[in-house]
Amino acid sequence: MRTVYLNGDYVAEQDAKVSIFDRGFMFGDGIYEVTAVIDGQLIDFPGHMQRLRRSLGEIGMTMPLDEDGLARIHHHLIEDNALREGLVYLQVTRGTQDRNFLYPSTDTPQTLVLYTQAKAVIDSPLAKRGLTLISVPDLRWQRSDIKTTQLLYACMAKEMAKAEGADDAWLVRDGAVTEGSSNNAFIVTRDGAVVTRELSRALLPGITRGVLLDLIERDGLRLEERPFTLEEAYAAAEAFVTSSTSFVYPVVNLDGRAIGNGSPGPITQRLRQRYIDRVHDLIH
Ligand code: PDD
């Protein structure tokens, strides 16, 4: 049984109760973050806190606590739950109120929830096998750069993938891939360039994506930040996705077509290893 954090208290998970009037529950009016934990240590925590501050600001909210205060809660939960590898989930909502679309006054207490979840990030079987994907239209709202808790379309996209026997989905808007349902999307062209869409309101600025772009350039690979089409993806030598809970996962099939030779590509595997090496450097 886990210890979780709710509004100032550390409680057993079954005792953590949130009001039915919470705006997170009623309107999806909240922001979240997911930070990876490896060997009991947080990975790229400052980047996640910077994005949290930005997401909150974009919907007129402020940080529930300062970064040190949030770090203390993360560390407390990791220790209490003896978490070695997995993630810490953080969610902050605009608090509770009777039904009213307008925001409550700014002195309304926010709801702050954190919990840990164990997951094999480094020795994940998906990293060896690679993902099969389908493409679906990107029907999300037009502020996908904000990490809000309204994730219904991401859930629908994953369900559509599951119904077709695939692992996940890439989202397509105006003929180009925006990102994955819960990760950023990359291809490697046949002449060796790594391509991922440039940041805009259409996609989440992934923390893993940002770190990987540095590693790609340091590796001497050519990087192109631009939209890419499904046709380019079908013809790519390799493809992969990035996120905090997967790091780098190869993509081996898209819409029933093998990517490259249908197994995880060498550049993808090298970048995953570079990412893991960097994580080990950070924590040792
Ligand atoms: N998802 N794009 C979307 C839509 C995401 O939901 C995520 C992360 C990413 C990758 O961002 P990062 O590298 O900062 O994790 C990109 C998290 C893991 C989730 O929702 O559980």
Image (cartoon, rainbow, N blue to C red):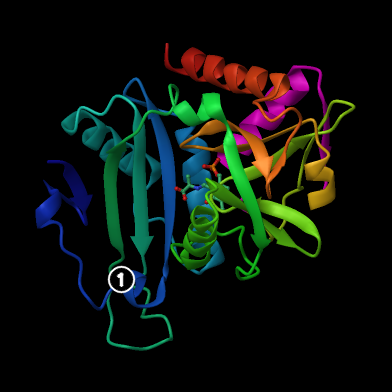
Q: Residue at x 58, y 22 (%)?
A: 275
Q: Where does residue 77 sit, x and y in percent of width and height? A: 23, 37
Front residue (pair 45, 12): 12
**Residue type marked 1:** Gly
Badge 1 element: loop
Above or below for 35 versus 21? above
* Ligand 1 contact, mark 1 (Cβ < 8 Å): no
Q: Residue at x 63, y 44 (%)?
A: 184
Q: Residue at x 16, y 32 (%)?
A: 80
Front residue (pair 51, 204): 204
Q: Where does residue 15 sit, x and y in percent of width and height? A: 9, 56
Q: Where does residue 238 sit, x and y in percent of width and height? A: 74, 31
Q: Is residue 227 visible?
A: no
Q: Which quadrant of the view contains residue 19?
A: bottom left
Q: Where does the magenta region start and end? A: 204-226
Q: Does the magenta portion include 151?
A: no
